[in-house]
Image (tube, rainbow, N blue to C red):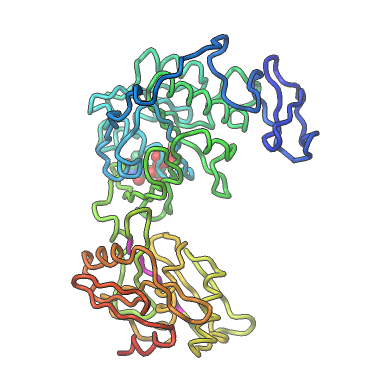
């Protein structure tokens, strides 16, 4: 395929330019990196307004208005929280997630709420017709009746209508169904996605509206199209959860206007998404106490602690290699903890099948959750429940030692608020929390004795 007049193919690895598309870059030899892009973009950077060589003159930073830039609050508490307080005018936000997770629902609700607050919105869908949007709207508790909708995929037309309407927030569902006439390729291809995002970014920065984009996620979890899309936009949010469960987690993986790694928790109901009032305890809601092999820990999700339950089941293995199945936990971390329990705690797991599950579809990424996993395993082997009001916070080292965790005060304070009265932590954590008896342990050898007591 030759490039259309006015465009070239550029390698996204080395930046070399080629007139024709190929599977491999002639310059650096990388595969599948050639991306069509309009000419006049040295190094692939966004162009200024063409023909306008001077642009705006430099100004002193102190003369720039900005301190008072308001945010538009949607009133969907968890959404505003994850953004850092609301939608920032002139920003571009990408909301990624698997199909069916609730991206369109979330954004249509935001549009409804912003419109109600007097902010003109335009919701453009290339995925659904206005009639289909209407069907969704009829289900929602937030009535999006006043929101302007448009079924369109051509970016030039979308930008024209957004400007004509004077939209202050433009919703685009999705970036993969949009295309620009400037490029030859089909919607959704890397060049199109990147160019559309760059054009939307320019539109937002030059004219001031905020743009909220939906982005589809590929099987390996990235936003379809290039990683570079994440570099172009200001904020990247991932909407996660298991379609079978009601809970949805909105996570900020990049945020120029707020803290990264914040999460918001929603529940999908028959009338749309509802922010969860007590996100810290959301994943404990279905916990059954008094069963062996269950232990609770507190994760830090951004600045907020969240309580999660770890379940373990160790049973006598049949023939062959015993099974090790971990859901919500890296299986190598599980292997490590089992090896430490075996060598340092004298607990043989050799002949046991081991299953570990983190409830609510949560993933344990912090080593601070080691002690909870270990306690759940010990409890399962002993077939003795751990106290229902106990929290476990500690990293386990290869020597079997228990190490302190960060932000322990905040985790304990949240646990106390949720009715926990005991915390098992590292003996090296000097911490006190109101309403909580703190039990320090030096190593995992003490765990079995402590839990029996
Ligand atoms: P949707 O927003 O279409 O997901 P996405 O845009 O990420 O593909 O949400 C789809 C699912 O949500 C669908 O399975 C139906 C369900 N749903 C509800 O449970 N309640 C509702 O009020 C709505 C609008 C959708
Ligand atoms: Mg959708």
Indicate whether 240 appears above or below 413: above
| 312 magenta-colored | yes
- Quadrant for ligand 1 reads top left
Q: Please name the predominant secondary structure of the magenta segment in the image.
A: strand
| 218 magenta-colored | no
In x, y percent, where is residue 327?
Answer: 49, 65
* In the foreground, 39 or 318: 39
Q: Which residue is depicted at the point 48% across and 32% down? A: 174
Left or right, 340 with respect to 89, comes to right
In x, y percent, where is residue 122?
Answer: 36, 23
Indicate whether 424 appears above or below 109: below
* In the foreground, 255 or 216: 255
Indicate whether 189 appears above or below 180: below
Q: Which residue is depicted at the point 57% across and 86% down? A: 350
Q: Which residue is depicted at the point 28% across and 61% down? A: 281
Q: Residue furthest right?
A: 26
Quadrant of residue 28 in the image? Answer: top right
Residue bounds of the magenta highlight: 306-313
Count of numbered circles on the image: 0
Image quarter of the C terminus? bottom left
In x, y percent, where is residue 358?
Answer: 42, 66
Q: Which residue is depicted at the point 33% across and 33% down? A: 87
Quadrant of residue 389 in the image? Answer: bottom left
Indicate whether 154 appears above or below 78: above
Left or right, 358 with respect to 336, comes to left
Quadrant of residue 436 in the image? Answer: bottom left
Q: Residue furthest top?
A: 51
In x, y percent, where is residue 317?
Answer: 56, 84
Image quarter of the N terminus? top right
* In the foreground, 288 or 265: 265
């Amino acid at each position: 395929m030759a490039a259309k007049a006015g465009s070239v193919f550029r390698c996204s690895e080395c930046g070399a330019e080629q007139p024709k598309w190929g599977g491999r870059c002639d310059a650096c030899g990388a595969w599948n990196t050639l991306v069509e892009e309009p000419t006049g973009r040295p190094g692939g950077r966004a162009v200024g307004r063409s023909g306008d060589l001077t642009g705006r003159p430099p100004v002193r930073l102190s003369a720039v208005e900005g301190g008072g830039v308001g945010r538009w609050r949607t009133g969907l508490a968890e959404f505003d929280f994850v953004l850092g307080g609301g939608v920032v005018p002139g920003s571009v936000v990408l909301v990624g997630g698997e199909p069916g997770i609730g991206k369109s629902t979330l954004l249509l609700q935001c549009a409804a709420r912003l419109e109600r607050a007097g902010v003109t919105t335009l919701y453009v869908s290339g995925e659904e017709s206005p009639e289909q949007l209407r069907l969704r709207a009829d289900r929602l508790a937030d009535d999006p009746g006043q929101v302007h909708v448009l079924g369109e995929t051509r970016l030039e037309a979308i930008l024209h209508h957004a400007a004509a309407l004077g939209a202050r927030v433009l919703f685009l569902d999705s970036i993969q169904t949009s295309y620009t006439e400037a490029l030859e390729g089909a919607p959704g291809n890397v060049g199109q996605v990147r160019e559309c995002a760059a054009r939307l970014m320019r539109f937002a920065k030059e004219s001031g509206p905020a743009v909220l984009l939906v982005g589809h996620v590929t099987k390996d979890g990235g936003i379809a199209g290039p990683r570079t899309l994440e570099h172009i936009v200001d904020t990247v949010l991932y909407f996660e959860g298991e379609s079978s469960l009601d809970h949805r987690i909105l996570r900020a993986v990049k945020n120029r206007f707020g803290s990264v790694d914040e999460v918001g928790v929603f529940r999908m109901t028959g009338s749309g998404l509802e922010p969860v009032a007590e996100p810290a305890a959301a994943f404990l809601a279905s916990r059954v106490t008094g069963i062996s092999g269950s232990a609770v820990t507190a994760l830090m999700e951004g600045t907020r602690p969240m309580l999660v339950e770890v379940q373990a089941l160790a049973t006598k293995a049949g023939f062959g290699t015993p099974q090790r199945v971990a859901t919500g936990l890296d299986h190598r971390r599980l292997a490590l903890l089992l090896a430490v329990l075996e060598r340092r705690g004298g607990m043989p797991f050799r002949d046991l099948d081991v299953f570990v599950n983190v409830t609510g579809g949560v993933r344990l990424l912090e080593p601070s959750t080691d002690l909870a996993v270990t306690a759940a395993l010990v409890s399962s082997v002993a077939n003795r429940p751990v106290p229902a009001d106990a929290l476990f916070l500690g990293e386990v080292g290869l020597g079997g030692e228990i190490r302190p965790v960060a932000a322990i005060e905040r985790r304990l304070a949240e646990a106390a608020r949720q009715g926990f009265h005991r915390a098992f932590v590292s003996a090296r954590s000097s911490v006190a929390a109101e309403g909580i008896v703190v039990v320090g342990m030096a190593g995992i050898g003490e765990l079995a004795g402590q839990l029996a007591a």
